[in-house]
Image (cartoon, helix red, strand yellow):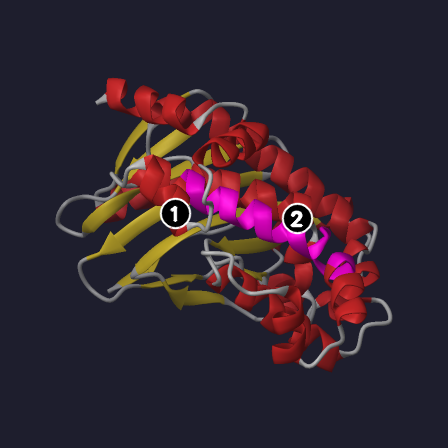
Amino acid sequence: MELNLPYINPVNFAGTLVKNYGFGISEAWNSHHLKLPDSLGDGTLQLFIRKDIHFFRGKWKFLKDTTFLSRDPVGQKGLIDFRLNKDGQIHSSFIEGIKKFEWEITEADGIRFFIPEAYLTIDKHKLSDQFEKYCTNQHIVNLQKQIFNIPSGQICNTLLLESKMLEFIYFWMDSLKNNDIERHFEGIADSRLTALDEARALIEADTSNTLLIKSISRKVGLNEFDLKRDFRKVYGLPLHQYRMKFRMEMAQDLIRNTDLPISEICTKLGYTNRFHFSQLYERFFGTSPSAVRTFLTRKL
Protein backbone atom coordinates (compact mmCIF):
# COMPACT_ATOMS: atom_id res chain seq x y z
CA MET A 1 0.00 0.00 0.00
CA GLU A 2 1.11 3.56 -0.67
CA LEU A 3 0.33 6.64 1.40
CA ASN A 4 0.66 9.55 -1.02
CA LEU A 5 0.61 12.69 1.11
CA PRO A 6 1.59 16.34 1.14
CA TYR A 7 4.48 16.43 3.62
CA ILE A 8 5.61 20.03 3.98
CA ASN A 9 2.22 21.59 4.79
CA PRO A 10 1.04 20.07 8.09
CA VAL A 11 -2.62 21.07 7.68
CA ASN A 12 -2.83 19.41 4.26
CA PHE A 13 -0.91 16.41 5.61
CA ALA A 14 -3.48 15.82 8.35
CA GLY A 15 -6.43 16.60 6.08
CA THR A 16 -5.33 14.08 3.45
CA LEU A 17 -4.91 11.33 6.06
CA VAL A 18 -8.50 11.95 7.17
CA LYS A 19 -10.09 12.46 3.75
CA ASN A 20 -8.24 9.86 1.65
CA TYR A 21 -7.32 7.18 4.18
CA GLY A 22 -10.04 7.35 6.82
CA PHE A 23 -7.92 8.42 9.80
CA GLY A 24 -9.83 9.62 12.83
CA ILE A 25 -8.92 13.08 14.12
CA SER A 26 -9.44 15.05 17.32
CA GLU A 27 -7.91 18.22 18.72
CA ALA A 28 -6.58 18.89 22.20
CA TRP A 29 -3.95 21.08 23.83
CA ASN A 30 -2.70 22.76 20.67
CA SER A 31 -2.33 19.49 18.76
CA HIS A 32 -4.06 17.20 16.28
CA HIS A 33 -4.46 13.54 17.27
CA LEU A 34 -4.76 11.21 14.30
CA LYS A 35 -5.68 7.53 14.64
CA LEU A 36 -5.31 4.77 12.06
CA PRO A 37 -8.61 3.17 11.04
CA ASP A 38 -8.91 -0.49 12.09
CA SER A 39 -9.02 -1.49 8.43
CA LEU A 40 -5.43 -0.23 7.97
CA GLY A 41 -3.81 -1.16 11.27
CA ASP A 42 -3.24 0.26 14.73
CA GLY A 43 -1.50 3.39 15.90
CA THR A 44 -1.60 7.13 16.45
CA LEU A 45 0.10 10.31 15.39
CA GLN A 46 0.27 13.53 17.42
CA LEU A 47 0.85 16.63 15.28
CA PHE A 48 1.89 20.03 16.64
CA ILE A 49 1.81 23.13 14.44
CA ARG A 50 3.64 26.34 15.32
CA LYS A 51 4.09 29.45 13.20
CA ASP A 52 7.52 28.55 11.81
CA ILE A 53 7.99 24.90 12.72
CA HIS A 54 5.89 21.79 13.03
CA PHE A 55 6.57 18.35 14.42
CA PHE A 56 4.87 15.09 15.23
CA ARG A 57 5.35 11.87 17.16
CA GLY A 58 3.96 8.74 15.56
CA LYS A 59 3.74 5.09 16.56
CA TRP A 60 1.87 2.65 14.34
CA LYS A 61 1.75 -0.72 12.62
CA PHE A 62 -0.03 -1.17 9.30
CA LEU A 63 -1.64 -4.49 8.42
CA LYS A 64 -0.01 -4.46 4.98
CA ASP A 65 3.44 -3.42 3.78
CA THR A 66 3.16 0.34 3.43
CA THR A 67 5.28 3.00 1.73
CA PHE A 68 5.09 6.74 2.31
CA LEU A 69 5.73 9.09 -0.58
CA SER A 70 5.12 12.74 -1.30
CA ARG A 71 5.20 14.95 -4.37
CA ASP A 72 6.34 17.90 -2.26
CA PRO A 73 9.87 18.92 -3.29
CA VAL A 74 12.51 18.35 -0.62
CA GLY A 75 13.35 21.74 0.89
CA GLN A 76 10.08 23.35 -0.19
CA LYS A 77 9.39 26.65 1.62
CA GLY A 78 12.96 26.54 2.96
CA LEU A 79 12.13 23.82 5.49
CA ILE A 80 14.71 21.24 6.56
CA ASP A 81 13.17 17.87 7.40
CA PHE A 82 14.43 15.60 10.19
CA ARG A 83 13.38 12.02 11.01
CA LEU A 84 14.39 10.49 14.33
CA ASN A 85 13.68 6.84 15.13
CA LYS A 86 13.51 5.22 18.54
CA ASP A 87 16.83 3.45 17.92
CA GLY A 88 18.52 6.87 17.78
CA GLN A 89 19.13 7.13 14.03
CA ILE A 90 18.42 10.55 12.55
CA HIS A 91 18.03 11.40 8.88
CA SER A 92 17.31 14.45 6.77
CA SER A 93 16.44 14.19 3.08
CA PHE A 94 17.41 17.86 2.66
CA ILE A 95 20.88 17.57 4.20
CA GLU A 96 21.60 14.11 2.78
CA GLY A 97 20.78 15.32 -0.73
CA ILE A 98 17.85 12.93 -1.31
CA LYS A 99 15.62 14.25 -4.08
CA LYS A 100 12.21 13.01 -2.93
CA PHE A 101 10.36 11.91 0.18
CA GLU A 102 9.84 8.16 0.01
CA TRP A 103 10.42 5.40 2.56
CA GLU A 104 8.91 2.27 4.06
CA ILE A 105 6.61 2.93 7.06
CA THR A 106 4.85 -0.39 7.76
CA GLU A 107 5.86 -0.27 11.42
CA ALA A 108 7.35 2.80 13.02
CA ASP A 109 7.97 4.63 16.27
CA GLY A 110 9.51 7.98 15.56
CA ILE A 111 9.60 11.75 15.51
CA ARG A 112 9.41 14.07 12.52
CA PHE A 113 10.17 17.78 12.67
CA PHE A 114 10.76 20.64 10.25
CA ILE A 115 13.00 23.67 10.84
CA PRO A 116 13.36 26.71 8.54
CA GLU A 117 16.75 26.68 6.82
CA ALA A 118 17.13 30.36 7.73
CA TYR A 119 17.35 29.37 11.40
CA LEU A 120 20.47 27.28 10.83
CA THR A 121 23.84 28.48 9.58
CA ILE A 122 25.22 25.09 8.58
CA ASP A 123 26.95 23.51 5.62
CA LYS A 124 24.63 20.66 4.69
CA HIS A 125 27.35 18.81 2.79
CA LYS A 126 29.72 18.98 5.75
CA LEU A 127 27.08 17.55 8.10
CA SER A 128 25.70 14.86 5.80
CA ASP A 129 28.00 12.17 7.21
CA GLN A 130 27.60 13.21 10.85
CA PHE A 131 24.00 12.30 11.66
CA GLU A 132 24.72 8.94 13.25
CA LYS A 133 27.18 10.68 15.57
CA TYR A 134 24.87 13.42 16.81
CA CYS A 135 23.79 11.28 19.77
CA THR A 136 27.08 11.89 21.58
CA ASN A 137 25.48 15.06 22.93
CA GLN A 138 24.31 13.56 26.21
CA HIS A 139 21.55 16.10 26.83
CA ILE A 140 20.02 15.37 23.43
CA VAL A 141 20.21 11.63 24.10
CA ASN A 142 18.45 12.06 27.45
CA LEU A 143 15.68 14.14 25.90
CA GLN A 144 15.22 11.59 23.14
CA LYS A 145 14.76 8.82 25.70
CA GLN A 146 12.31 10.93 27.70
CA ILE A 147 10.22 11.58 24.58
CA PHE A 148 10.02 7.91 23.65
CA ASN A 149 9.14 7.00 27.24
CA ILE A 150 6.00 9.16 27.06
CA PRO A 151 3.10 6.80 26.23
CA SER A 152 2.07 7.41 22.64
CA GLY A 153 -1.38 8.56 21.62
CA GLN A 154 -2.66 9.59 25.05
CA ILE A 155 -4.22 13.06 25.05
CA CYS A 156 -3.38 13.57 28.73
CA ASN A 157 0.34 13.42 27.86
CA THR A 158 0.13 16.02 25.09
CA LEU A 159 1.49 18.97 27.07
CA LEU A 160 4.43 16.93 28.32
CA LEU A 161 5.18 15.63 24.82
CA GLU A 162 5.03 19.12 23.30
CA SER A 163 7.33 20.63 25.93
CA LYS A 164 9.90 17.84 25.55
CA MET A 165 9.77 18.05 21.76
CA LEU A 166 10.37 21.81 21.82
CA GLU A 167 13.25 21.35 24.25
CA PHE A 168 14.71 18.62 22.03
CA ILE A 169 14.46 20.79 18.90
CA TYR A 170 16.10 23.73 20.69
CA PHE A 171 19.12 21.70 21.77
CA TRP A 172 19.32 19.94 18.39
CA MET A 173 19.41 23.31 16.59
CA ASP A 174 21.95 24.65 19.07
CA SER A 175 24.13 21.58 18.57
CA LEU A 176 24.07 22.04 14.79
CA LYS A 177 24.75 25.77 14.85
CA ASN A 178 27.62 25.48 17.31
CA ASN A 179 29.19 22.43 15.65
CA ASP A 180 29.00 20.40 18.86
CA ILE A 181 28.98 17.24 16.78
CA GLU A 182 32.36 17.99 15.26
CA ARG A 183 33.89 19.17 18.53
CA HIS A 184 33.03 15.87 20.18
CA PHE A 185 35.09 13.97 17.60
CA GLU A 186 37.96 16.38 17.03
CA GLY A 187 41.26 14.53 17.09
CA ILE A 188 39.73 11.04 17.42
CA ALA A 189 40.49 8.60 14.60
CA ASP A 190 37.67 6.55 13.05
CA SER A 191 39.27 3.32 14.27
CA ARG A 192 39.21 4.63 17.84
CA LEU A 193 35.59 5.74 17.49
CA THR A 194 34.78 2.18 16.45
CA ALA A 195 36.58 0.81 19.51
CA LEU A 196 34.74 3.25 21.78
CA ASP A 197 31.42 2.22 20.29
CA GLU A 198 32.33 -1.42 20.97
CA ALA A 199 33.12 -0.46 24.57
CA ARG A 200 29.74 1.24 24.90
CA ALA A 201 27.99 -1.86 23.53
CA LEU A 202 29.85 -4.09 26.01
CA ILE A 203 28.81 -1.85 28.90
CA GLU A 204 25.16 -1.87 27.83
CA ALA A 205 25.17 -5.66 27.39
CA ASP A 206 26.74 -6.17 30.84
CA THR A 207 23.56 -5.51 32.80
CA SER A 208 24.79 -7.44 35.85
CA ASN A 209 27.90 -5.22 36.07
CA THR A 210 30.49 -8.00 36.02
CA LEU A 211 32.91 -6.63 33.41
CA LEU A 212 35.90 -4.75 34.80
CA ILE A 213 37.24 -1.72 32.95
CA LYS A 214 40.51 -3.53 32.28
CA SER A 215 38.53 -6.36 30.63
CA ILE A 216 36.67 -3.88 28.43
CA SER A 217 39.98 -2.21 27.60
CA ARG A 218 41.49 -5.52 26.52
CA LYS A 219 38.45 -6.54 24.45
CA VAL A 220 38.38 -3.30 22.41
CA GLY A 221 42.15 -2.92 22.07
CA LEU A 222 42.64 0.36 23.95
CA ASN A 223 44.69 0.99 27.06
CA GLU A 224 42.69 2.02 30.12
CA PHE A 225 43.86 5.64 30.10
CA ASP A 226 42.86 6.21 26.45
CA LEU A 227 39.59 4.35 26.94
CA LYS A 228 38.54 6.48 29.93
CA ARG A 229 39.69 9.77 28.41
CA ASP A 230 38.13 9.33 24.97
CA PHE A 231 34.96 7.64 26.25
CA ARG A 232 34.22 10.73 28.31
CA LYS A 233 35.00 13.01 25.37
CA VAL A 234 32.70 11.13 22.99
CA TYR A 235 29.80 10.16 25.28
CA GLY A 236 29.85 13.12 27.64
CA LEU A 237 30.23 11.10 30.85
CA PRO A 238 33.00 9.15 32.58
CA LEU A 239 32.72 5.47 31.78
CA HIS A 240 31.58 4.44 35.27
CA GLN A 241 28.91 7.16 35.34
CA TYR A 242 27.64 6.16 31.90
CA ARG A 243 27.37 2.57 33.13
CA MET A 244 25.49 3.61 36.28
CA LYS A 245 23.13 5.86 34.33
CA PHE A 246 22.38 3.11 31.80
CA ARG A 247 21.59 0.61 34.57
CA MET A 248 19.32 3.11 36.32
CA GLU A 249 17.41 3.74 33.09
CA MET A 250 17.06 -0.01 32.63
CA ALA A 251 15.80 -0.28 36.22
CA GLN A 252 13.23 2.41 35.52
CA ASP A 253 12.01 0.56 32.44
CA LEU A 254 11.73 -2.76 34.31
CA ILE A 255 9.91 -1.17 37.25
CA ARG A 256 7.43 0.63 35.02
CA ASN A 257 6.85 -1.98 32.34
CA THR A 258 7.22 -5.41 33.99
CA ASP A 259 5.83 -7.23 37.01
CA LEU A 260 9.26 -8.33 38.23
CA PRO A 261 9.70 -7.83 41.99
CA ILE A 262 12.01 -4.95 42.84
CA SER A 263 14.35 -7.36 44.63
CA GLU A 264 14.69 -9.38 41.42
CA ILE A 265 15.33 -6.24 39.35
CA CYS A 266 17.98 -5.26 41.87
CA THR A 267 19.74 -8.62 41.48
CA LYS A 268 19.32 -8.64 37.69
CA LEU A 269 21.21 -5.36 37.45
CA GLY A 270 24.06 -6.50 39.68
CA TYR A 271 23.12 -4.74 42.92
CA THR A 272 23.61 -6.91 45.99
CA ASN A 273 22.26 -4.31 48.41
CA ARG A 274 18.64 -3.31 47.81
CA PHE A 275 18.91 -0.27 50.08
CA HIS A 276 21.87 1.04 48.06
CA PHE A 277 19.95 0.37 44.83
CA SER A 278 16.93 2.32 46.12
CA GLN A 279 19.14 5.24 47.16
CA LEU A 280 20.71 5.44 43.69
CA TYR A 281 17.33 5.19 42.00
CA GLU A 282 15.91 8.01 44.10
CA ARG A 283 18.98 10.15 43.39
CA PHE A 284 18.41 9.72 39.65
CA PHE A 285 14.63 9.99 39.45
CA GLY A 286 13.56 11.83 42.59
CA THR A 287 11.42 8.99 43.94
CA SER A 288 11.96 5.47 45.24
CA PRO A 289 11.35 2.28 43.21
CA SER A 290 8.63 1.17 45.64
CA ALA A 291 6.85 4.54 45.34
CA VAL A 292 6.78 4.19 41.54
CA ARG A 293 5.35 0.68 41.80
CA THR A 294 2.72 1.81 44.32
CA PHE A 295 1.66 4.69 42.05
CA LEU A 296 1.39 2.42 38.99
CA THR A 297 -0.61 -0.17 40.94
CA ARG A 298 -3.10 2.47 42.11
CA LYS A 299 -3.56 3.69 38.52
CA LEU A 300 -4.64 0.18 37.54
Q: Magenta residues? A: 232-252
Residue 70 numbered mark, or none: none
Task: Name the residue rendered at 69%, 69% in the picture.
Answer: 128
**Which of these two is toward me, 262 or 236?**
262
> In this rendering, would 163 be left or right of 151?
right
Q: Determine if residue 232 is in view.
A: yes
Of badges 2 and 1, nearer the viewer stands 1
Compared to 18, does 40 lie above or below?
below
> In this rendering, would 257 be left or right of 53?
left
Q: Position of residue 252 (x, y in %)?
A: 43, 38
Helix, strand or loop at disc 1? helix
Q: Position of residue 195 (x, y in %)?
A: 66, 76
Which is the main secondary structure of the residues drawn in magenta? Answer: helix
Task: Name the residue rendered at 54%, 67% in the picture.
Answer: 201
The N terminus sits in image quarter: bottom left
In primary-sequence order, the first of circles 2 and 1 is 2
Helix, strand or loop at disc 2? helix
Task: Name the residue rendered at 78%, 59% in the picture.
Answer: 233
Q: How crowded is mark 2: few (under 14 residues within 10 Å), some or many (20 or more)?
A: few
The amino acid at mark 1 is Thr
Residue 241 numbered mark, or none: 2
Residue wearing tag 1: 267
